[in-house]
Image (cartoon, helix red, strand yellow):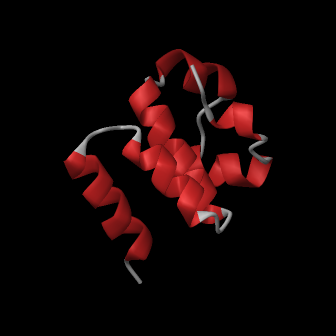
Amino acid sequence: METIFDHNVTPEEYFELNRNISRETYLRLITQKDAYVHLAYLYHMRGKKRKAKQYIEKTKDCNLINSFWRTVNHP
């Protein structure tokens, strides 16, 4: 399964995405769909919107995709 740990997430980025969840707990509980969402947020935080778009679209969930863009574009 592809996760943020395959993309050199920094401790600061990980904290921003997951707060108080340990890496072991994250890997045990995460689904691939949720991992794609986290990858989209990671790349959006890094300013790589095209890459974020690629990952959020991998979810194939229109509601989730719309929610992601509403969240990241909300002032």
Residue 67: quadrant of the picture: bottom left
Instruction: Name the residue at the left extreme.
Output: 63
Q: Between 31 and 60, which is closer to the camera in this rendering?
A: 60
**Residue at position x 30%, y 38% from top?**
60
Residue 20 screen position, x and y as percent? 60, 40
Expressed as whole percent of the image width and height from the top left, the position of residue 22 reads: 65, 29
Q: Position of residue 71 (x, y in %)?
A: 37, 66
- View extreme (top): residue: 28
Residue visible at 73% across and 39% down in the picture: 7
Where 45 falls versus 27 (above or below)? Answer: below
The answer to whether 70 appears left or right of 28 in the picture is left
> What's the residue at 61%, 52% (across, down)?
42
Quarter of the image containing the N terminus?
A: top right
* Observer-nearest of 70 and 11: 70
- At x 48%, y 25%, the residue is 30
Instruction: Report whether 72 appears left or right of 48.
Output: left
